[in-house]
Image (cartoon, helix red, strand yellow):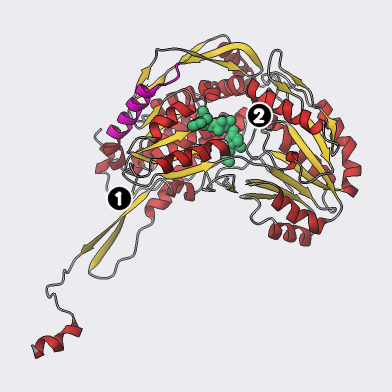
Amino acid sequence: MTSPSASIAGSVRAPAPANEPVRDYAPGSPEATRLRQRIDQIRAETRQLPHVINGERVFGGAEADVVSPHEHGRVLGRITPAQGKQVEAAIDAALSARRVWSRTPWWERAAVFLRAADLVTGKYRDELLATTMLGQSKTFHQAEIDAACELADFLRYNVHLAAGIYEQQPSSDPGQWNIMDHRGLEGFVLALTPFNFTAIAGNLPSTPALMGNTVVWKPSEKSALSSDVVMRVFDEAGLPPGVINLVHGDGQTIATHALADEHLAGVSFTGSTTVFRSLWKQVAQHLDTYRGYPRLVGETGGKNAIVAHPSADPDALLVALVRGAFEYQGQKCSAASRAYLPRSLWQRLRDPLIDIIRTLRVGDPTEHETFVGAVIDGVSLKRLEAAIGKAKSLDSHQLLVGGTVRPETGWFVDPTVLVTTDPTAFTMSEEFFGPILTVHVYDDWDTVLPLIDATSPYALTCSVFATERTAIAQALDVLRDTAGMTYVNDKPTGALIGRQSFGGGRASGTNDKTGSALALQRWISGRFIKENMNPDLDWTYPYLRESRIES
Ligand code: NAD
């Protein structure tokens, strides 16, 4: 690829980003009517979802069905799970594209992703929303904030953040010039993405690519339908062949091949803690054969707490509990899944919480009445059913509301609230990734805060509800290492790119703060260049002079 803008003189400024406005999709509105038509059309199709290797759409081989979680008899698409041959072809394509792409001026790379953002919010908005709603069981609102707004925000803010990084240059003393060359990594980056956010699926391969890397991207099999649209967006935006190579299929098979390659330069992962740990171990096993030290970036599980002080506003707390725990069926990494409520407030909140949860409609998310769709697959439903069953069998737990699963037509799990007298129980420490909230009613604020910190291995998000400033300050201090994102008087979900970047520590990941400059820095391998305008012409130093005279 020749680069026409390589001849541009002058430093280039990135456009100022703004968060994409969220559309309402009120019943009967023009945007909802148009989207409904697109949903009906895609629902009636069975799409062939190809690998995209070196710009070529590759079909063929044994097929696997991609179904709708809320209507699991409906086959929306088919993938052909990649074998070693396709993975190797994708790696080769990435390595071949790297030389030119890594030398392409940053603003030209950025222009591709800015164009992609406009395609996301324009031409492809309805298709991205429809495939996310059908394939990942998201409601109108959940699909809009993910597949349109957050995806576009990632693409636009990352360009702005990259421009800020490229501006950073070292100072130089007279007679020399120091330059920082913000190179991409040497080799290829493997991006493995989760099912639950179309935005994350698009962001994980595009962030390293923006910074000059070339990528092998394996999306979740469970989000293959929307990932196919994301890849077409990148293609139409002008991404050169080989820069991002998409291979569908089984994570373990694909990762085993990719992690064994000597050119692995980094892994960009979001998903479960168990899988990330297995990737890290595999990388360690291959360490002697790699050409460098692969960068490992992983955002993983969570067990996110809402804690309320007796001074908390009960109405705001109620909204946070319902939205934080049950939007998108609790399948957000940041979803609230444990709550610590003071006895005084619990007496007021208990019945209103039950009443609201009973009114939440569980069903087809493409219908306007639905608040809770289906969980992603039968494995997830069985895991959640087992967790509820185990909790019900314990004397320390009481089922307050929900607790039923309905797998006949879709994988539906009713929003479930458990109450436990045992704050160390498995329901307060393990990630379930579904619509289950466990409440512990506490008596002493001073002891509940360290308990929250010590109970779970995760450290992703938490929420503190209080109106007394001293209580807020105390919670922020005690819970400093408990979460990578702490919300005060707000639900623990819904981080907005450019405003709150997300990520957590401990078992929740490497905390590289997706959507911030820190995340972009992970995909740079700097090179310093020093040019000397007045090279020394005498090899001696002043301290040597006397001895030289003597000799
Ligand atoms: P997952 O770990 O099952 O899958 C993630 C990706 O890894 C998928 O592409 C999958 O195919 C692949 N994979 C699965 N098994 C693999 C293996 N053995 N080797 C290599 N790759 C493998 O996660 P998921 O179910 O898609 O997503 C849910 C998880 O993701 C939850 O734990 C959630 O907390 C986490 N998550 C975290 C964040 C965050 O920012 N911290 C964001 C979203 C999701």
- Image x and y of residue 170, in percent: 34, 62
Tell which of 144 and 118 is nearer to you.
144
Which residues are drawn in magenta? 80-96
- Image x and y of residue 500, in percent: 59, 47
Q: Is residue 322 visible?
A: no
**Prevalent SS, magenta region:** helix
Q: Secondary structure at mark 1?
A: loop
Residue in the image at 39% along x and 30% along y: 257
- Image x and y of residue 256, in percent: 42, 31
Q: Is mark 1 within 8 Å of ligand 1?
A: no
Q: Quadrant of the C terminus?
A: bottom left
- Image x and y of residue 49, in percent: 46, 17
Residue in the image at 68% along x and 39% along y: 430
The crowding category of the residue bearing disc 2, from other C-alpha atoms within 10 Å (few below 14, some 14 to 19, many at least 20), is many
Vertical position of residue 432 compared to residue 16: above or below: above
Is 86 in the magenta?
Answer: yes
Q: Using the numbered discs, state the Cα–Cα distance from disc 2 to disc 1 in whole angstroms.
A: 43 Å
Residue 386, quarter of the rendered image = top right
Q: Quadrant of the N terminus?
A: top left
